[in-house]
Image (cartoon, rainbow, N blue to C red):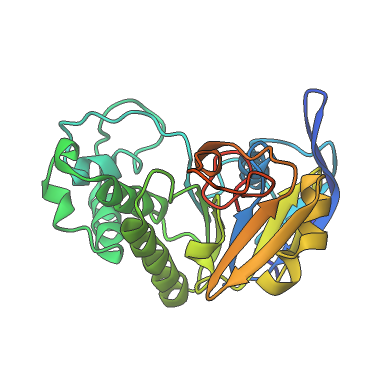
Amino acid sequence: MSAIAFSGVTLRLGRRTILSDVGFEIAPGEFIGLLGPNGAGKTTLMRAILGLVRPNAGAIRVLDRPARRGNAAIGYMPQLRANADLRWTGWDFVASAAGGRGWGLPRLDAAARRDVEAALDRVGARALARRPLAELSGGERQRLLLSQALLGKPDLLLLDEPLASLDPKHQRGVVELVSRLQRELKLAVLFSAHEINPLVNAIDRVLYVGAGQAVLGRIDEVITGPVLSRLYGSEIEVLRIGKRIFVMAGDGEAEGEACRHGPGHDHSRHSLEGTSHARL
């Protein structure tokens, strides 16, 4: 049995090829980090698993069945989220995902209310349930979003950029929480991120996408100069300093924070760690 299996999958959006004849398999209960350059197709890959994007070729199976829309066995935390009413409490916010796709707060039966309460308890958010969203920090709202993804007791979690806009402390908190849930609930987790370092001690393997390809393996197998050079389409160097991994580009095209250099900085090589252009 597999949690996710791609076999000869090609995905295109218009004239753009996201994946070309890609195959990989993720086992039940695995924690997988999904990484790649901006625009490489991480979100599209997740949407394909959800059955929202159909492959142009090949087959996608989820929990040993063809990928399909509305699969209740998948919990999904999207990158782009609809704006909630900031007057809602945390309980209202989680409950809004339990009543289908209608607008506003649903009327929940007793079983659905118990599911909401259990999902809040799993992420330690019972205290947040009584507070309005306007009072919550970004990390606390992420905890509620994760609680939403746990409704219905899924077997697979797809988390699209859950660390975005969080400071390092809250990033660690989210990763530790997801790791605990993955172990306790025996979930398969696909967790997309811009960089590898917050995930190093949590994930089993990394799935790296780029240039229409996908490579799945251990961190030390995938995050290497030769593999990433192929996926980025340019020369990449990987440096390991202590427990941190730095990915360096030699073409001087990195954007974002890596371009904000002080006097005396060597402009011939830029770290992609922490940038918006091609971060791990």
Q: Is residue 63 above or below residue 108?
A: below
In terms of depth relative to the viewer, which is nearer, 274 or 191? Answer: 274
Residue 79 makes an appearance in the image: yes
Q: Residue at x 25, y 32 (%)?
A: 105
Q: Residue at x 25, y 46 (%)?
A: 109
Q: Residue furthest front?
A: 264
Residue 82, percent from left and from top:
38, 29
In terms of depth relative to the viewer, which is nearer, 70 or 33? Answer: 33
Q: Is residue 148 above or below residue 237?
A: above
Q: Is residue 125 left or right of residue 209?
A: left
Q: Is residue 21 left or right of residue 216?
A: right
Q: Residue at x 35, y 41 (%)?
A: 97
Q: Quadrant of the N terminus?
A: bottom right
Residue 8 makes an appearance in the image: no
In terms of depth relative to the viewer, which is nearer, 172 or 50? Answer: 172
Q: Is residue 13 left or right of residue 63?
A: right
Q: Is residue 220 left or right of residue 24?
A: left
Q: Residue at x 40, y 73 (%)?
A: 180
Residue 101, percent from left and from top:
41, 31
Residue 217, percent from left and from top:
73, 69
Q: How many marks?
A: 0
Q: Is residue 174 above or below residue 86?
A: below
